[in-house]
Image (cartoon, rainbow, N blue to C red):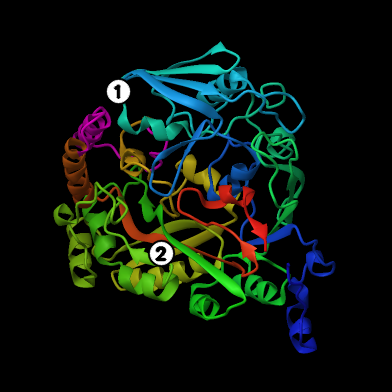
Amino acid sequence: MKKQGFFGKVGLLLLIGIFVFSFAVEAAPDNELRWGRGTDATSLDPRTIRDVYSWAIHMLVFNSLIYFDDEMSVQLDLAKSMEFPDDTTYLFEIHEGVKFHDGVELTAADIVYTFETMRDEEFASPYRGRLSPITSVEALDDYTVKIEIDEPNAPFIYELDVYIVPKHIAPDKMDKEGGFAHEPIGSGPFELINWIPNDRIILERFDDYWEGPAKLEKITVIEIPEADVRLTELRAGNLDLTSIPSRFIEDFQEDPNFTVGQYTTLNWFPIWTQHDHDILSDVRVRQALAYGTNVEEIVEHVYYPTGVVSIGPIIPGTWAEAPDVIRRYDYNPEKARELLAEAGYPDGFEIELRCSSGEANVQFGEILRQQWLQIGVDLNVNQTEWSTYASDVVSSNFELAYHGVVDQFDPDIHLGRFVSGEINGGNWTNYVNPEYDEVVYAARKIIDDQEKRAELYREAQRIFSEELPSIPIRHSILTMVWDADFEFDFRRGVEYRTLNEAYWK
């Protein structure tokens, strides 16, 4: 039975009253989940954006052909079966009787439409570059789809985890702010009832869901930027699920009223460096900034215990990791100043770091600014709300930027972000290195020999560590806390998909 909370002390109520939202006034029904988050979604059209805040909602509103579990294995979703007639062809048979939230059946035509709009240059989807290997998407009949690519491409299977939109409603023009992006219709276990930007997203169970209705009737996603306020609301019973400041994790682990879920993510957080920038285009400058960054101090003071130090793009413990070939940049301000002098900046320079707003980013920026002042670099930290920041990053409108990239199901997903041009749709830094490109391309074409791919990725990591197209900072450990009476299977890769099966005891 779901417990209902209340504020016990009038003084505490007055202190945080300014932050108490309407959801604290009325008791929630037993089959509702109240989920507190620090940042709102950007767009609910899954073709237009892939930030983690929007993606979490997409998981509940839409379905994909396939997805990947916590062991990076392919799992079928809309696809009833998947075949590979040859090294460049993917054949999917989809389930019959899948309905969109408006009652219209989902067919192969919707899958073709989704992929074609994302591949359309005028639509300008951020997926376009990642889907560029596709040469054709064809509906063989109402329930069979054939996708062909230009050449063997081992990691490309991971790009097919795309949420499918309805052809009869979803627009063929990009629109992140209104229409379908604000009022989407999907085929997932929950349908959107209301989205009040920067306040809440209300989802309700879709009773005609093709795999059977979810156990939860309602999910209310509430934006509360202040982490300490989310914590207070959680303890008061006004939230059921949220992330919390890392310094409180141990307290919640010892509290029988809550469950703490953790896993090492497939996400990577570097400082992205703009290679079209006159100063940052010099590798000596990038190496100097790395030597001038005390990553251990940053992780310990800002991210512990939810972060680990990164030495490169590959996730620790995964099959392509090669720490023995990676050049290290242990904190060394003197070496940093020497490199800056060699590059022609003995007195340092001024530079801007862009990042989204948030408590952790504020702390990160403050510590990094103080560290870089020791090597003569005057860092201006420019924080903006996420949607503006994300738009600027994908347009390469930054000098330095700090944020994470997600879901390294395959090493190519992060390493490929630094290949020349738009091959992987994420080279915001404009880094160009033909030698690096050649190695990553070669690994991409090996379909059935992981050891050969790993050898090539060793070389890619060596080049990366010498050239530093971006400065590694951390990998993340994702932690969520929820009411102990709520049964929720929170796992890497699957993440919030399992809210479809979650329930109150």
Residue at 37%, 70% in the rendered image: 299
- Residue at x 38% of width, y 23% of height: 133
SS assignment at label 1:
loop
Residue 291 drawn at (x, y percent) = 24, 65
CA–CA distance in space, label 1 to label 2: 44 Å
Q: Amino acid at mark 1?
A: Pro
Q: Which mark is residue 152?
A: 1
Residue 95 screen position, x and y as percent: 59, 25
Q: Is residue 82 left or right of residue 142?
A: left
Q: Residue at x 67, y 41 (%)?
A: 189
User: In screen coordinates, is 343 left or right of 257?
Assistant: left
Compared across the picture, whether 192 is left or right of 259 comes to: right
Q: Quadrant of residue 14?
A: bottom right
Q: Do callouts 1 and 2 mark residues in contact (Cβ within 8 Å)?
A: no
In the rendered image, is residue 121 in sight? Answer: no
Taking depth in this image into account, of 250 and 406 the one nearest to the observer is 250
Give the quarter of the image for residue 256. bottom right
Q: Amino acid at mark 2?
A: Leu
Whether residue 464 is visible here, answered yes or no, is yes
- SS type, badge 2: strand
State whether residue 33 is above or below residue 367. Answer: above
Residue 198 figure quarter: bottom right
Q: Earlier in the sequence, mark 1 or mark 2?
A: 1
Task: Determine which residue is flagged by label 2.
Answer: 379
Toward the viewer: 232 or 172?
232
Q: Which residues are magenta?
A: 424-450
| Front-most of residues 350 and 3 | 3
Residue displayed at 73% across by 67% down: 2
From what the image shows, is residue 174 above or below residue 464? above
